[in-house]
Image (cartoon, helix red, strand yellow):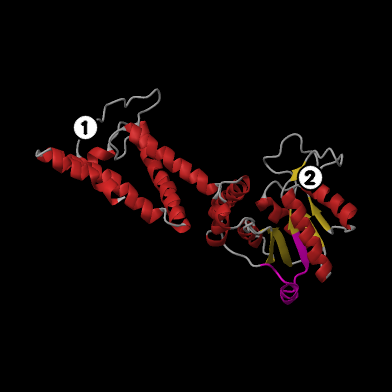
């Protein structure tokens, strides 16, 4: 490997006495040898590979403002730092706007770097390891609740939030709860049977629901709870379209019956946003999260792209944006 990296330098010194040839050979040596050196540093282990992918993704994010600025006006950043760009006007015009350059030699290099960064970002977001790490380090954490904790907090009711419905389930002939709704409902019923607490369910039809959705989450949950679990939900709220309305509308029903302390059941990723909305209602909340993002693959498989990883990452990004919006409203 050393011979491979040093060969351009040896060839340049041996063949030419012209200093320009020596300089050129040094440049080629750096081009070859530096790539090998960086590979040894960054690709020597799983942590290094992950760090490199993160760096590429973040660099792509950092390039986004450059693309916006120089896409709407001719390239300027290079000139502000280094002086006039030698190829500033080469192929700069586009059908809409201009081709960005950033600090690259030409727009092609900028495009290649941006494409590589986008690929790295997509790879990372498609890895289950990324979703697990972000769920444990980026999103506020809530531990699983215990029966003793519910008793100590003097909880009066369990509140389950809806998470979507399957409007058409041909095998059943009726609408069915989506995976998130079913998991939350099952956990809420389990908590009720462990503690004797009544259960409230909140969920209408979300803002994004299409015309195929004709049954509210509350209606579907009540039917499934009765048919599949032999359980009757005490309070049903089926008008809400989002988490904020979940909190406002179910709080009115609960306060009317003197309920002030609740256990809130929703996904662990959704819990931070739900807590912000429910705390505004004046209720005392004990979080009871379910649906934790946990690794289902081992070792290197966590860092290979998968539909599971992309789904978890997209949910996490959705909740981060929703949490930011909820805090801005407050």
**Is residue 257 visible in the rendered structure shown here?**
no
Query: Magenta region: which residues?
Result: 144-159
The answer to whether residue 290 is above or below residue 72 is: below
Q: Residue at x 75, y 51 (%)?
A: 181
SS for callout 2: loop
Q: Position of residue 157 (x, y in %)?
A: 78, 65
Name the residue nearer the viewer: 50 or 227. 50
Is 152 inside the magenta-drawn segment? yes
- Quadrant (top left, top right, bottom left, bottom right) of the C terminus: bottom right
Q: Residue at x 30, y 31 (%)?
A: 74
Q: Identify the residue position indicated by label 1 in the image.
A: 86
Q: Position of residue 170 (x, y in %)?
A: 84, 37
Distance Cα–Cα, label 1 vs label 2: 63 Å
Q: Identify the residue position indicated by label 2 in the image.
A: 216
Seen in the image, is 174 located left or right of residue 164?
A: right
Quadrant in the picture for residue 172: top right
Seen in the image, is 266 located left or right of residue 325?
A: right
Name the residue nearer the viewer: 132 or 218. 132
Q: Residue at x 71, y 62 (%)?
A: 264
Name the residue nearer the viewer: 26 or 163. 26
């Amino acid at each position: 490997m050393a011979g491979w990296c040093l060969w351009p330098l040896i060839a340049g010194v041996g063949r030419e006495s012209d200093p320009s040839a020596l300089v050129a050979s040094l440049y080629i040596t750096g081009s070859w040898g530096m790539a090998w050196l960086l590979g040894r540093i960054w690709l020597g282990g799983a942590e290094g590979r992950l760090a490199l992918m993160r760096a590429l993704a973040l660099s792509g994010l950092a390039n986004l403002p450059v693309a916006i600025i120089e896409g709407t006006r001719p390239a300027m950043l290079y000139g502000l730092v280094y002086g006039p760009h030698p190829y500033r006007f080469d192929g700069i015009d586009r059908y809409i706007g201009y081709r960005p350059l950033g600090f690259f030699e030409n727009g092609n290099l900028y495009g290649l770097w941006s494409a590589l960064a986008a690929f790295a970002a997509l790879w990372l977001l498609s890895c289950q390891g990324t979703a697990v790490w972000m769920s444990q380090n980026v999103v506020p954490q809530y531990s699983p609740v215990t029966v003793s904790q519910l008793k100590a907090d003097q909880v009066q009711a369990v509140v389950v939030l809806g998470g979507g419905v399957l409007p058409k389930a041909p095998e059943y002939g009726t609408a069915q709860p989506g995976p998130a709704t079913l998991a939350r409902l099952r956990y809420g019923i389990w908590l009720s049977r462990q503690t004797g607490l009544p259960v409230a369910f909140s969920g209408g039809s979300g803002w994004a629901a299409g015309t195929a959705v004709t049954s509210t989450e509350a209606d579907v949950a009540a039917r499934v709870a009765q048919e599949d679990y032999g359980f009757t939900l005490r309070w049903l709220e089926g008008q809400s379209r989002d988490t904020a309305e979940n909190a406002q509308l179910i709080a009115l029903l609960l306060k009317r019956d003197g309920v002030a302390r609740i256990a809130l059941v929703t996904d662990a990723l959704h819990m931070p946003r739900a807590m912000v909305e429910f705390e505004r209602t004046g209720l005392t909340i004990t979080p009871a999260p379910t649906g934790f993002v946990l690794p289902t693959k081992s070792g290197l498989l966590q860092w290979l792209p998968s539909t599971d990883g992309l789904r978890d990452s997209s949910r996490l990004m959705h909740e981060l944006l929703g949490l930011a919006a909820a805090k801005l409203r407050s």
